[in-house]
Image (cartoon, rainbow, N blue to C red):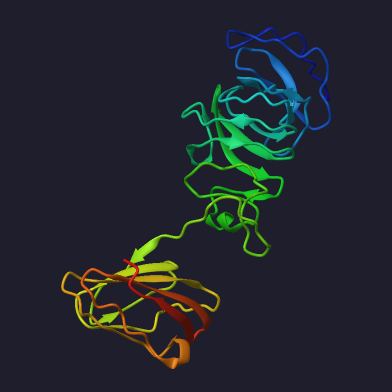
Amino acid sequence: MASTLAVDKIKTLSGVAIGWPAADGALNQVLGTDGAGQLSFRADSAAEVSKGADIASADPLVITASANYFICTGTTGFNDMTVAANRHFYLEFSGILTMTHNAGVLDLPGGGTIVTAVGDVGEFYSTAANVVTCVNYTRVGGVINTDIAAAAAIADTKISLGTAIQAYDTDTAKTDVAQTWSKGQRGTITALADGANIATDLSLSNNFSVTLAGNRTLDNPTNIVAGQSGSIFVTQDGTGSRTLAYGGYWDFVAGAAPVLTTTASKIDRIDYVVRTSTSIHAVVSLDLS
């Protein structure tokens, strides 16, 4: 015999008073509890992405239970959220604001701040009530995924794994466009090891220095790339009278290698431009100090 069991007006479950929603939910929503006996219909965060009402930025930022995708409006920064445990949700930012890392409360990639840009989307998970981790952050100009080292190479994104994600900056230097430097730029001066044959790795720096403690040869550098330029500061030791010969890649005016200043403690400077992988054009400024 077929029969139908109708269940209505259940008030308690294992001694907990249950509050039922006033009406049916939307298609594909699930029934969930707030942990205090109140049931409501919400998006199935395991399978569906459901957009909720916009959330005004505030500190703390309040994440409602109505959906799992929200547009965060306004420019008020925050370092914590009010949200139930085990929520997986997304925030799209419509304004520029600062999210500040707050260890154990709002954990951001690299433990630093994130300055949002319009259109950025953050993916978050609450491991406990009001304890949130940003598990992914997507810039409007490219994806930042802190779990993939290759993300560091994404164009127009300043990122160093293990450090704060910085806002997109139109002044960021790029290798494939003309740049106008409005501030001083500096290249380190890398010390070379003195020896009978002095080795120079051009991948390490543009500028170098060495103090001669004997008659030496400046060997052909390694990692030679056309277009690199710089200087080599050559200092005589306290004895002086040190000479410097050159590898075959070093090209000087009229094919003649210069004779260095040999006075003790004096400094000469070799300025160079790499023409090809086997030709380095160089000029020497003598007795500078």
Q: Which residue is drawn at 46% across and 87% down?
A: 253
**Going by the image, does 260 lie left or right of 130?**
left
Q: Which residue is drawn at 68% across and 48% down?
A: 170
**Going by the image, does 47 lie left or right of 78?**
right
Q: Which of 109 and 35 is in front in this view?
A: 109
| Rendered position, 199 above or below 80 | below
Residue extending furthest left?
A: 239
Q: Report the quarter where the C terminus lies.
A: bottom left
Q: Report the quarter where the N terminus lies.
A: top right
Locate residue 244: give its quadrant.
Answer: bottom left
Q: Which of 102 and 277 is in front in this view?
A: 277
Q: Residue at x 67, y 10 (%)?
A: 18
Image location (x, y in percent) of residue 224: 47, 79
| Rendered position, 78 above or below 186 | above
Residue 192 seen from this side: no
**Going by the image, does 278 lie left or right of 242?**
right
Image location (x, y in percent) of residue 27: 83, 31
| Rendered position, 239 above or below 181 | below
Residue 264 seen from this side: yes
Image location (x, y in percent) of residue 25: 81, 23
Image location (x, y in percent) of residue 160: 51, 50
Q: Which of 4 and 177 is in front in this view?
A: 177
| Rendered position, 168 above or below 24 | below
- Number of dots carrying numbers: 0
